[in-house]
Structure formats: C-alpha cells, structure tokens
C-alpha cells in the first residue's frame, strides 16, 4: 500500500492542499480524542477512540486498520470502527454532492470539501465525479495528499500509546522499548512510499510506478480480502453489542464527523472562495 | 446528562435514517456513476482500474518547493503532537 501512497503527491495542490488536507486532520483527531475520553468517558478503551478518530479524519478503513494495529486495539473494536465508517461513507458519498449542488458551493470548493471529509478514496472519486471534472480532480488531489498521513499518524499513535497509554507512568519509556512495541509495518509503509516517490518515480517515470502498482494491486487486494476475512472471523458480536451499548461509539463518530465537516468547510472557504487568497489555476 | 441522552437519540436517528437512505440509494442506483461503475468492488479504490490516472500531478503547478512543504508539514505534525500530549496531561490533572 505504501508504494501507491506517493509522498511526492504532497506538491500536487501546493499550499492549498496542505491547508485543506493537513490543517484539519490532526485537529479533528485531537478533538475526537478529547471528546471520546473526556466527554464520553471512553477511557477504558482508548485504542477504540483513536481508531474511530483516525477512520473519521483520514481515510476510513485503511487508517482504521493501521491505527488499530499501532494502538493494539481489539479486533472487535476495529470491526465496529470499520462498519460505522463504511455506513456513513456511503451516505456521505451520495448526499454530499447533492447538498453541494443545492447550495451552489461550486466544483472547486465542493470537490475540496469532499476530498477532505469523505472517508474512503474510492468514495471520494465517485462523489467528486458527481460534481464534474473539476470537482473530481480537486477531490482526488486533496484526498491523495491526506492519504500520505496514514503512516505518520500510525507512527504518532504507536509512540503515544507506548510512552503514555501503556506506560505505567513510573518510568520513561526507553528508545528500545518504543522500538520493541512499535508495529514494524509502519516502517515498511514509509520505506515503500519514499522509495516509490523519490527513487523509482524520478528515475523510471510515473508509468513504471503505475505498472508496479497495477501488479502489486492484485496482491494488495488479496491481502485486504484476507485481512477483512480474518477480522470477520475474530469478531464477536456479543462483545460488540456490549461495546456499542449506550451508543457512545456512534455519538463519537457523528460528533467527530460533524466537527470535521464544519472545520473543513471553514478552511476550504478561506482557501478557495477567492475572497482571501487567489484562486488556484487548475488546468483540466 | 440530558445533553448526552439527546446526543444519543440524535445519533440513533441519524443511523436509522442512514440505513433507510442506503437502501433507497441502492434501490434507485443513485450511487452509481456510469464511468465509475466497476461493480461491488468500486467502493475501495484499489479496485478502481488504473486508479493512478485519477491522481493528476499535471493540473496544478505549485510555486512552493516540495522541501518547504515538507518542513511545514513536519512542524505542524510536531506542534499537533505536543498539543495532543498537553491535552491528555491536562485531562489527567483534572482527575
């Protein structure tokens, strides 16, 4: 997956992309962490809180899987987070373009809003296409920049949980301890992304990276099928029912997503309305 | 406590409406965009044939160097991580 999440995409939308994709995401994660642990008092299951938070703010399923592994979340929690994310992604994928059209937000701002708020990259592509060519391009640009954060967030979560959540507080976690507990797949993700972005693409061209990804996609799809099957096999619905009782995970997702939409809209409006900054020249 | 109950009710209403909307969307094929109809697997981007072509790096020319953007990115990451630590420690202090 790291090979297809190109770090070099970072420049594809300049500072506009940075502002929309990156300014909001960590703020939403921190807000949801605070809301989940403090307001909803889900302190007894912090990995679940961070898994839902990253699924909401980054890219749904992929981010949930990476963060769940980084925080040592239970399989049931991952199943629940993925389920909630998928249900709402489908709804947002269809309704967001309808609302954007009805409000006359326009393809540029609408596409950026979709790219920043709809969870899955596939759903972003579909929703952006419903707006038009410019909407599709802007939505995918923003999402591809946001996707770069999966590895960084998983790494930060792994360090945070190792040094704070799983630490008894009596001693400072040493570098070797962090290394032992750190899920090593994150390093592989980074390595693949950096190699594809800064070695393979500059030397051999974008088409070669595309060909390699086409080949890797077959393995990746099988790996995802196996991962989802494994998650399903290890899911205990009785435990999930207990987990969801009280509706806290649902409240966390809904409140977090509303916060995400409002904040993303504010940043999109400031960056792309043309009132505060010059409009980006996107050549289609 | 009342706020919490209201929030739960709102969330459940949204969930139920979402299920109804999902069924309606599937029944009326609203979610299908003709050129992006790759079957049931269309949800996940890895299933979209040649997904790379949707990521266009030739439509916008950034005036800012990639290294400046990366530095901004790393600084922002560090600031946000510190904020996360601060908020988490503030929470512990209050308990």
Image: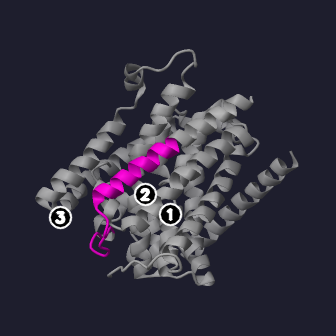
Would residue A160 be found to the left or right of residue A103 on screen? Answer: left
Q: Which marked residue is nearer to the observer: mark 3 or mark 1?
A: 1
The residue that disc 2 covers is A146
- Marks 1/2: CA–CA distance: 7 Å
Q: Nearer the viewer, residue A251 or B46?
A: A251
Q: Please say whether residue A225 is visible from this viewpoint.
A: no
Q: Nearer the viewer, residue B47 or A202?
A: A202
Q: Please say whether residue A243 is visible from this viewpoint.
A: yes
> What residue is rendered at 76% in x and 60% in y?
B13
Q: Which mark is residue A207?
A: 3
Q: Report the quarter where the C terminus of chain A lies.
A: bottom left
Residue A123, position as x, y percentages in the image: 47, 65
How many residues crowd mark 3 within 10 Å: few (<14), some (14–19), many (20+)?
A: few
Q: Earlier in the sequence, mark 3 or mark 1?
A: 1
Tell me how the rendering is colored.
one colour
SS of the residue at dot 3? helix
> What residue is rendered at 52% in x and 78% in y?
A273
Q: Are marks 3 and 1 in contact (CB under 8 Å)?
A: no
Highlighted magenta segment, given as a residue range: B55-81
The residue that disc 1 covers is A116
- Marks 3/2: CA–CA distance: 22 Å
Q: Are marks 1 and 2 in contact (CB under 8 Å)?
A: yes
Q: Earlier in the sequence, mark 1 or mark 2?
A: 1
Query: Which residue reaches farthest left?
Result: A203
User: Would you identify the image quadrant in which residue B16 lies?
Assistant: bottom right
Q: Relative to A272, does residue A222 appear above or below in the rendering?
A: above
> What residue is rendered at 59% in x and 44% in y?
A80
Residue B61 in the magenta stretch? The answer is yes
Q: Which mark is residue A102?
A: none
Q: Which marked residue is nearer to the observer: mark 3 or mark 2?
A: 2
């Amino acid at each position: 997956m790291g090979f297809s999440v190109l770090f070099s995409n970072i420049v594809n939308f300049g500072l506009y992309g940075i502002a929309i994709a990156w300014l909001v995401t960590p703020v939403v994660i921190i807000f949801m962490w605070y809301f989940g642990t403090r307001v909803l008092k889900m302190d007894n299951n912090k990995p679940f809180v961070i898994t839902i938070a990253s699924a909401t703010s980054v890219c749904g399923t992929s981010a949930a899987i990476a963060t769940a592994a980084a925080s040592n979340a239970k399989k049931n929690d991952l199943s629940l987070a993925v389920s909630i994310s998928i249900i709402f992604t489908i709804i947002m994928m269809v309704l967001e373009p309808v609302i954007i059209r009805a409000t006359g937000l326009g393809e540029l701002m609408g596409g950026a809003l979709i790219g920043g708020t709809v969870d899955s990259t596939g759903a972003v592509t579909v929703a952006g296409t419903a707006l038009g060519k410019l909407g599709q391009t802007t939505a995918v640009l923003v999402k591809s920049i946001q996707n770069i954060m999966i590895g960084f967030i998983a790494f930060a979560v792994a360090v945070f949980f190792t040094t704070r959540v799983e630490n008894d507080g009596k001693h400072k976690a040493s570098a070797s301890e962090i290394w032992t507990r750190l899920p090593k797949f994150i390093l592989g993700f980074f390595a693949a992304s950096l190699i594809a972005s800064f070695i393979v693409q500059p030397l051999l061209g974008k088409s070669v990276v595309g060909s390699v990804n086409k080949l890797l996609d077959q393995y990746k799809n099988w790996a995802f099928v196996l991962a989802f099957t494994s998650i399903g096999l290890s899911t205990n619905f009785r435990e999930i029912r207990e987990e969801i009782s009280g509706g806290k995970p649902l409240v966390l997702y809904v409140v977090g997503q509303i916060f995400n939409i409002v904040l993303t809209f504010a940043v999109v409006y400031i960056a792309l309305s043309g009132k505060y900054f010059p409009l980006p020249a996107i050549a289609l | 406590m009342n706020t919490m109950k209201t929030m739960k009710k709102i969330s459940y209403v949204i969930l139920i409406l979402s299920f109804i909307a999902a069924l309606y969307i599937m029944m009326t094929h609203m979610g299908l965009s003709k050129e992006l109809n790759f079957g049931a697997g269309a949800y996940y981007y890895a299933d979209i044939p040649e997904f790379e072509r949707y990521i266009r790096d030739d439509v916008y020319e950034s005036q800012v160097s990639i290294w400046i953007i990366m530095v901004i990115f790393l600084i922002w990451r560090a600031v946000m991580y510190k904020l996360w630590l601060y908020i988490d420690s503030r929470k512990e202090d209050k308990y």
